[in-house]
Amino acid sequence: MRSGLRALAEIARIDEEADVVVVGLGCAGAAAAIEAAGAGARTVVLERASGGGGTSGLSGGVLYLGGGTKLQRACGFEDSPEAMFAYLMASVGDAPDELKTRLYCEGSVAHYDWLLAQGVPFKETFYLGVSGEPPTDDGLVWSGSERCHPFRDLARPAPRGHVPQHPHQTGHVLMRFLIESAKRSGARIETDARVTALVLDADGAVVGVVASRFGVERTIRARAVILATGGFIHADDMLRRHVPLALRCKVRVGAEGDDGSGIRLGMAAGAATLHMDKASISLPVTQPWGLKRGILVNAQGQRFINEDAYYGRLGEAALFHQGGRVWLVVDDEVFEEPDYVKRVAAAGETPDELERELGLPGGSLGATLALYNRFAKEGRDPQFGKQADYLKPLERAPFGAIDCTTDKAIYAAFTLGGLATDADGRVLDPEGVPIPGLFAAGRATSGLAVGSYSSGLSLGDGTFFGRRAGRTAAAG
Amino acid sequence: MRSGLRALAEIARIDEEADVVVVGLGCAGAAAAIEAAGAGARTVVLERASGGGGTSGLSGGVLYLGGGTKLQRACGFEDSPEAMFAYLMASVGDAPDELKTRLYCEGSVAHYDWLLAQGVPFKETFYLGVSGEPPTDDGLVWSGSERCHPFRDLARPAPRGHVPQHPHQTGHVLMRFLIESAKRSGARIETDARVTALVLDADGAVVGVVASRFGVERTIRARAVILATGGFIHADDMLRRHVPLALRCKVRVGAEGDDGSGIRLGMAAGAATLHMDKASISLPVTQPWGLKRGILVNAQGQRFINEDAYYGRLGEAALFHQGGRVWLVVDDEVFEEPDYVKRVAAAGETPDELERELGLPGGSLGATLALYNRFAKEGRDPQFGKQADYLKPLERAPFGAIDCTTDKAIYAAFTLGGLATDADGRVLDPEGVPIPGLFAAGRATSGLAVGSYSSGLSLGDGTFFGRRAGRTAAAG
């Protein structure tokens, strides 16, 4: 059979029988295991690293949840599944999965309660300072572009970043509780176990896996296999084929296991893939937030986005639409030390001087600033709709440009494409027909974010649809 | 087995034995059949329509060839494989296939001679009037952005559109000669025969096809199957998943058979796909060429491209980077009746009035025109590098805007993504390993154009790599 596949008829020995095998112990695998084992299925989790956690454990820990969770209400925010749905459908990319998005928004309040029930702690306080990952142990944070053009006019904004309690970067907290819960549920967890092949029966159904542990191969037969193996940000060959621009990003967000191996196993078994060309690209240049008062310009000296948008949105626009050649232009009043993107590319006493230093086309930056300043004085941004809070004419010399090119700045990338699944985690073939016995969840699949990102969608999507895959697989 | 696959062991009767089965009789299938049969292989071509030709037969007939073909030399143009390679590598998208591109450029002169040997007629005259498809029977034409920024500085320009002799739209001429040649070569051609499944042996190798003809199913066993089934511009479900913006294009370029069926057959057999999100999008608004003196502006009233670029390049930029919301702004001196995009969206005595009529942000169009005009007077375009021939200040009222939005204008789309193949036409699995017995060519594969197009790449690529697939399959 092809690479990544083994025929059941040719397997000499079955070493173990299970109901459900979960491949990978990040957030999606843990959630799947909890639900599968909780439903009474004999569940085995195989993790190739020496411990669970994966990319989820290294992450900021933000879960994108809403619709009026306990935490949102405790912090005094109103939200509704409808508002959350409208925001996500408008913001996640050109081809959102409407059914997944609807289920996610309608189930979000209950999913938060489920996280609490697993013991994951959330402090019922709100942090305003940054978007994404708070440097404090606060529980709620803005984590997307909800208050920004054009989304503020499409859906009532609410902060939806739910962050387990811990000072900064709390993915490991989430994973500690989820892994403990998986163990309590009765799932058997085996680390250092790398799945090398899916076992197919004569009808093409997936009926088990071959796993290698310290060089010893074992075969586990199972009614269902759930691939929760993560994305492919560490697979240069796949990036070159599908998202070549991601190769230019200085930071690749993902544990070592995000090498696409599970996606390729699924494809070998006949799975379709979706949105393999899409990636989340964070360009964290507007931290501290006062820097949103600057303007981002491209190689033609033009603005191209409202600078108050979520830093993931800035990165996607900068890399995919401007080829990674952008600068944040500030004046003396607006300038402050950026938290992450440190290099000043040029400075000048006039816009023309700055433009020359940057090598931008003659007159372009001056024209852009003149138009921006003219309306900023009135508290308006008719071209890009930046919030009035961040509109200030850029007039006080010297002028400076923070280098946001891919050569010099932090672009933090991870992939969004993966196996095509239905909303219950069944892996689909190119005709949209489920491959019997094969399930997937998390970054190994194409999930909620199909082209554009808000912080917390990965952990939110992974746990939510991981649970659904676990339940479906257990029900067989 | 899964949809699209049949196990050899379960096939009751083999109706025919062949060496090579070619699926689809467009340019790639015809070229593959000519070479396979010419090499002595028993070759059967199955075409689901009632006659051959497919999208190739409906096309303009342009083949992108160069490197110093007889036709280029007869028309007085110098070219080299190196210049052609440099142009293609820079212009076809972010992730060009270097090996395919190199082979194509190095083999282009001989490939033109091969076309002559099949009897395809080319008149040795050059047509300057338009890019793409000449309305005359001239043989050579500019068919890309070779003379435009940034390519003119990267590679010595040469016209490379080779057009079979016939007044306008000559794809049917090409196909008539190729089909005749395929018949002479000894290939058996069966029309109205739709391949519904690939036959796999126990090792997963492709060993034949099941075809349906007027409701009667037949099985043909073969050493090799070549999928030459075209793209998927008529598969709404696939467009929705992979290229949702293409659904907004008014014109879908392709014969009915371009429904992705062959791509899905290949995927069912374990093939990887590449660049499924990419499409060629033509926006033919700069014909007559004098209209290149206008400026294309986006919804922010900004320019975004050099307007002298090939109309496919304009369409890609307008749809994929500007969301299909663009207008061609002209003044009274530049305005003339466009050939294809007819609707005037607005007119005004001043830029401000035009801007209001179009609903563009206040001051934006005036600022854009002021900057453009300032440099156009000097014969320069520092922002986008439009050729001096087309630089003229737009100052003479009234001003007008030709509607180039997807709602109102012609956007002509076809897909560029497809099965992953090596340069010899072998279909590759996700690990890059050939699937035994399976080959593909033409739009069913990811070929030379991996994200951006020049006229003639489809027929050029399809015939060139179709021939290679035919030879490899026959040698198999």
Image: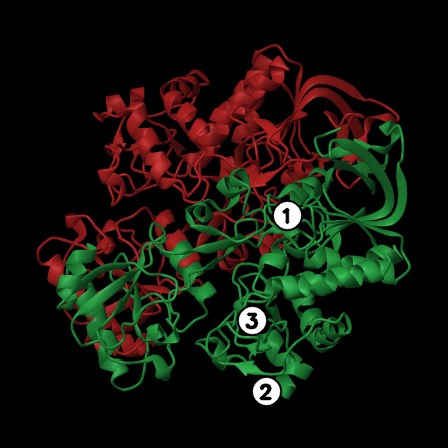
Chain colours: A red, B green
Q: Residue furthest left?
A: A378
Tell me the amino acid under the disc marked 3.
Pro
Tell me the amino acid under the disc marked 2.
Phe
Q: Residue at x 26, y 26 (%)?
A: A79
Under tag 2, what secondary structure?
loop
Residue A5 found in image quarter: top right
> Relative to residue A135, is residue B25 depicted above or below?
below
User: Do badges 1 and 2 share one subunit?
Assistant: yes
Q: In the depicted view, which residue is nearer to us: A86 or A220?
A: A86
Residue B206, position in %: x, y?
Answer: 81, 42
User: Cα distance, mark 2 to mark 3?
Assistant: 23 Å
Q: Residue furthest top?
A: A40
Tell me the amino acid under the disc marked 1.
Thr
Q: In the depicted view, which residue is nearer to us: A243 or A283?
A: A243
> Crowding at label 1, few (<14), some or many (≥20) Cα neighbours within 10 Å?
many
Q: Residue furthest front?
A: B167
Please give the label number shown on residue B77: 2
Residue A58, position in %: x, y?
Answer: 49, 39
Please give the label number shown on residue B273: 1
Image-based side of B59 in relation to B314, left or right: right
Mark 1 vs mark 2: give the one in front: 2
Circle 3 sits on which residue? B167
Under tag 1, what secondary structure?
strand
